[in-house]
Amino acid sequence: MLGRQTDVAAIHAGLTGWFRARREAGADCELSSLESPKAGFSNETFLAELATRDGTRRLVIRLEPVGFRVFPEYDLPRQARIMQCLADSPVPVPRVLWVEEDRRWIGVPFYVMERIEGEVPSEVPVYHTFGFCCDATPAERAQMWRSGIETLAAIHAVDWHARGLGFLGVPPAGTGPLDQQLAYYEHYLGWVGGPPQPILRAALAWLRDHRYTPRRVTLCWGDSRFVNMIFRDGRTVGVLDWEMAFLGDPEADLVWWILLDWAQSEGYEIPRLPGFPGAEETIRRYEAVAGVPVEHALYQEVFGAFRFGVIMAKIALRLKEIGGPAPSENFETDNVCTRRLAQLLGLRGK
């Protein structure tokens, strides 16, 4: 995807050698062919089975991306470490089996997880138009959504001190949790390059002008999306993709969940499937489960649209580089995020 130059045969050979060198797998183990999930821009991920004398294990192997990076910095071991810290917690994460930082095996760092059995909502095409969510009843969709929100609350209830998650960067007091994120995305926007971004820059200024002191500082998933969860029997059994995790205001996660669902449905004039709760019901459900009020939904919607706009600008510029399809000629500056910001803050033309 996005012009990657992955030599799957070479990766398979390197991984086979790596597994056979490990005592846990054994020299006579066999690695099945590597399968790629259909979606995802920021990671190289493969599904495989490893047959050993003790049986067969279904694995997920995640590699540091090559050729194209969505984010300015990419710390693969950091992602694995987050999940290791969350092992045996109320947050259902895959069990990380091994982390390999030595590049000699396949050219990049990678880690190996156990595969969680279940269903992942489709990202492309979006779950409102394709996949098991379309086959579900409205009641079943509502149950999955509620389970997702309950899982969000569980993430935010984690004692990140006790779990050793301070390595994510403990923010300063006061507006520090917001300042830390805004500084990162300002750096990110500068790294993206490309044409001027007047709406994103104006949104950044608005976010700085309207900072507040969060009620709580918690572990935040960062990429809290319905498509990043695994479901089984209507319940969340897996939380995936931790590369955007940070310590900050948990309202950012909740509003990102709502915003990204909107962006992938009504933002593109795709009707949402019946049964999925709307924004207000979602917020009320989170408040009931988390036991705290949501006080800054507008701020977090602006922040979410801003940071998603930065990500989309990077992806759009990459699509232009490789001659890929884009919804419009100026997609990096005129997209669902910039239009949302214009609507929220009256930024058009500034």
Image: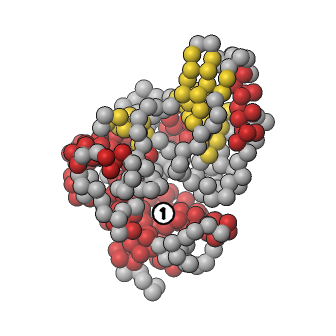
Residue reaching furthest to the front: 135
30 w.r.t. 210: above or below: above
**Viewer-side residue, 269 vs 175:** 269
Left or right: where does residue 154 sit relative to residue 310?
A: left
**Viewer-side residue, 169 vs 315:** 315
Residue 344 in the image: state x and y as whole percent.
34, 74
Q: How is the image coloured?
A: secondary structure
| Residue at image coords 37%, 56% | 129
- At mark 1, the secondary structure is helix
The answer to whether residue 292 of the structure is visible from this angle is no
Residue reaching furthest to the top: 53
| Residue at image coords 47%, 63% | 308
Residue 177 in the image: state x and y as whole percent.
44, 54
Q: Give the quarter of the image for residue 19.
A: top right
The answer to whether residue 348 of the structure is visible from this angle is yes
148 w.r.t. 69: above or below: above
Residue 172 in the image: state x and y as whole percent.
47, 52
Residue reaching furthest to the bottom: 349
Left or right: where does residue 340 sit relative to residue 108?
A: left
Residue reaching furthest to the right: 104
**Viewer-side residue, 190 vs 257:** 257
What residue did someone put label 1 on?
307
Residue 102 in the image: state x and y as whole percent.
74, 35
Q: Residues within 10 Å of mark 1 (few under 14, many from 20)?
A: many
Q: Amino acid at mark 1?
A: Arg
| Residue at image coords 26%, 58% | 279
